[in-house]
Amino acid sequence: LITASPRHLLAAERERLEDARTALRQAMARGVETARTRLAAQAGHLDALSPLGVISRGYSVVRTPDGRLVRRTGDAPPGTVVEARLVDGWLSARVEGSRAQKLNEPADDYTP
């Protein structure tokens, strides 16, 4: 009769409810931590791909004074004034010459 009493059944249900609350809190904490980890990874990926991230690794972005990006040598023929964005500011320069070189070709000294 004791195990069938309402008081005993209510205590058992309270214990079950508390166990479920604990499991839910733990599952929510794991879910939040998983989402936080994924968000940090995505933020790192975006940072690595951002133009400022590329510049911070030693590259520059070159553009004409009117803001057009210089992507190819033909975009800035000799005499063209260009601006280069570096990690600590801007350079202004005049193109004196250029030479073609594919990205996969070995680098050698630049001679215009």
Image (cartoon, grey):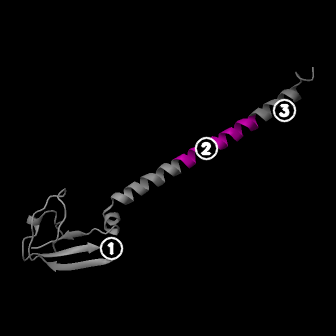
Q: Quadrant of residue 64?
A: bottom left
Query: Residue at the location (87% across, 26% down)?
Result: 6
Question: How far from the left and from the top, in percent, is residue 66?
Answer: 15, 72
Q: Which residue lies furthest to the top in this view?
A: 1
Q: Is mark 3 on a helix, strand or loop?
A: helix
Would residue 101 appear left or right of 21 to someone viewing this image? left
In-front residue for pair 25/62? 62
On residue 87, which mark appears?
A: 1
Q: Give the range drawn in magenta.
A: 17-34
CB contact under 8 Å: marks 3 and 1? no
On residue 28, which mark appears?
A: 2
Q: What element carries label 1?
A: loop
Would residue 63 appear left or right of 100 to someone viewing this image? right
The image quadrant where one finds the N terminus is: top right
Tag 3 residue: 11
Mark toward the start of the polypeptide (3 vs 1): 3
Question: How far from the left and from the top, in percent, is residue 44?
Answer: 42, 57
Question: How far from the left and from the top, in percent, is residue 56?
Answer: 35, 68
Task: Please identify, in this view, whether the residue under mark 2 or under mark 1 is nearer the observer.
Answer: 1
- Amino acid at dot 3: Ala
On residue 67, which mark appears?
A: none
The image quadrant where one finds the C terminus is: bottom left
Q: Measure the alpha-carbon separation of dots 3 and 2.
A: 26 Å
Mark toward the start of the polypeptide (2 vs 1): 2
- Amino acid at dot 2: Met
- Amino acid at dot 1: Val
Task: Please identify, in this view, whether the residue under mark 3 or under mark 2 is nearer the observer.
Answer: 2
Q: Is mark 2 on a helix, strand or loop?
A: helix
Q: Measure the alpha-carbon separation of dots 3 and 1.
A: 66 Å
